[in-house]
């Protein structure tokens, strides 16, 4: 009998999956799009994400824990599904690839400016391969360890309360803002990753309380984003935040120790744990989808996916280009995050109706 995921591991797994590079730029994005006290916009985004997670919960309840692939293949011919599978495999592979490339580009820029970033990318991909071939249960356990290896850094933000000023927050809300659908969507991208819980249905039982774990993981992420953004607005003020590329890195660089230089380099290295879990989960999801088409070794499939990912990453060598493609893929992923659960709900209702008709 295969080992099932635990509730605690699921909670931290999705917190780590949803956490990513965006935490370094999130305060700037909030300041640019929502102006004064822009951190409050996270409450609105969190509400929308929670609604989407509820749709996934309905799929889990109606499908009684069945795999989403089984649900789709029961009603839709495979010659229609296979192009869809290939599409989501490409999207998830590219998201994992570009997230990893974005991380190593910044790491190379701040720590090793003369080193080829593809060397770091190769090391990253090898570590990811060694983790992803262990299966989702071991990925969840590793993410729990990585959680404790990363979250202690946020406790250091208490250090900045000395220079935190309430006057920088201002008594006004969303003044000097440019609220647009595109700006709101760019903040929404910071929460993506929760939709991958759709693929975990067969790996859980009722004791796992999968959806409760996803809810709590998403809540922890929201509180994490809210805390970092609130401190950033009070430390810099919304006008200055607009001009900072990576506000969190600038905050960490402000902290100085007598026994170490370049503290932001050290702290940034620890965030690799979070990025590697995010990339691994998207690559694992791609492997799960492609395995419905090709019945070959899971390790071989994963090797092919990561090899292609590494080759593709050679194309993107400019940070702005990587960010642009991540944004485009993120918008597509938002459509998948909402569209896939809604489509599955319709399929399950149709299957239930046909079942009731047959039984009559």
Image (cartoon, helix red, strand yellow):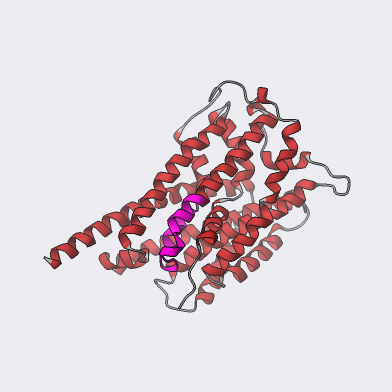
Left or right of residue 139, residue 72 in this image: left
Q: Is residue 206 magenta?
A: yes
x%, y% of residue 59?
34, 56
Q: Is residue 109 visible?
A: yes
**Which residue reaches farthest right?**
258
Identify which residue, 316 or 284, lies in the foreground: 284
Identify which residue, 148 or 112, lies in the foreground: 148
* Magenta highlight: main SS: helix
Task: Please identify the quarter of the rendering in which residue 118 is found.
Answer: bottom right
Q: Is residue 3 magenta?
A: no
x%, y% of residue 247?
67, 38
Q: Is residue 185 above or below residue 282?
A: above
Q: Quadrant of the C terminus?
A: bottom left
Left or right of residue 72, residue 248 in this image: right
Identified at 66% across, 35% down, the residue is: 231
Q: Is residue 104 visible?
A: no
Q: Quadrant of the N terminus?
A: bottom left
Q: Is residue 234 above or below residue 323?
A: above
Task: Please identify the quarter of the rendering in which residue 313 is found.
Answer: bottom right
Identified at 44% across, 64% down, the residue is: 207
Identify which residue, 126 or 114, lies in the foreground: 126
Q: Is residue 76 above or below residue 333?
A: below
- What range is drawn magenta here? 193-216
Left or right of residue 159, residue 214 in this image: left
x%, y% of residue 258?
88, 45
**Which residue reaches farthest front?**
207
x%, y% of residue 347?
27, 58
């Amino acid at each position: 009998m295969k080992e099932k995921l635990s509730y605690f591991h699921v909670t931290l797994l999705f917190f780590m999956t949803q956490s990513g590079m965006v935490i370094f730029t999130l305060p700037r994005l909030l300041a640019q799009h929502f102006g004064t006290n822009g951190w409050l916009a996270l409450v609105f985004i969190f509400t929308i994400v929670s609604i989407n997670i509820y749709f996934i919960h309905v799929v889990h309840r109606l499908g009684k824990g069945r795999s989403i692939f089984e649900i789709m293949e029961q009603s839709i011919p495979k010659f229609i599904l296979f192009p869809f599978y290939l599409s989501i495999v490409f999207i998830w592979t590219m998201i994992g690839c570009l997230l990893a490339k974005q991380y190593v580009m910044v790491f190379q820029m701040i720590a090793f400016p003369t080193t080829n970033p593809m060397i770091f990318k190769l090391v990253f991909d090898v570590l990811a391969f060694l983790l992803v071939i262990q299966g989702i249960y071991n990925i969840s356990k590793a993410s729990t360890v990585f959680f404790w290896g990363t979250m202690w850094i946020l406790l250091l933000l208490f250090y900045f309360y000395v220079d935190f000023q309430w006057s920088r927050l201002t008594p006004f809300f969303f003044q000097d803002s440019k609220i647009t659908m595109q700006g709101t969507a760019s903040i929404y991208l910071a929460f993506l990753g929760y939709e991958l819980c759709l693929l975990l249905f067969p790996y859980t039982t009722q004791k796992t309380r999968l959806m409760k774990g996803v809810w709590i993981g998403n809540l922890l992420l929201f509180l994490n984003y809210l805390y970092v953004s609130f401190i950033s607005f009070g430390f810099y003020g919304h006008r200055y935040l607009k001009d900072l590329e990576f506000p969190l890195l600038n905050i960490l660089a402000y902290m100085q120790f007598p026994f170490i230089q370049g503290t932001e380099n050290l702290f940034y290295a620890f965030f690799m744990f979070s990025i590697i879990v995010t990339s691994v989960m998207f690559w694992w999801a791609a492997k799960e989808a492609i395995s419905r088409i090709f019945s070959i070794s899971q390790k071989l499939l994963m090797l092919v996916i990561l090899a292609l990912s590494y080759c593709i990453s050679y194309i993107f060598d400019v940070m702005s280009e990587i960010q642009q493609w991540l944004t485009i893929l993120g918008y597509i992923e938002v459509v998948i995050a909402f569209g896939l659960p809604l489509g599955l709900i319709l399929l399950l209702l149709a299957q239930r109706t046909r079942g009731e008709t047959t039984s009559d």
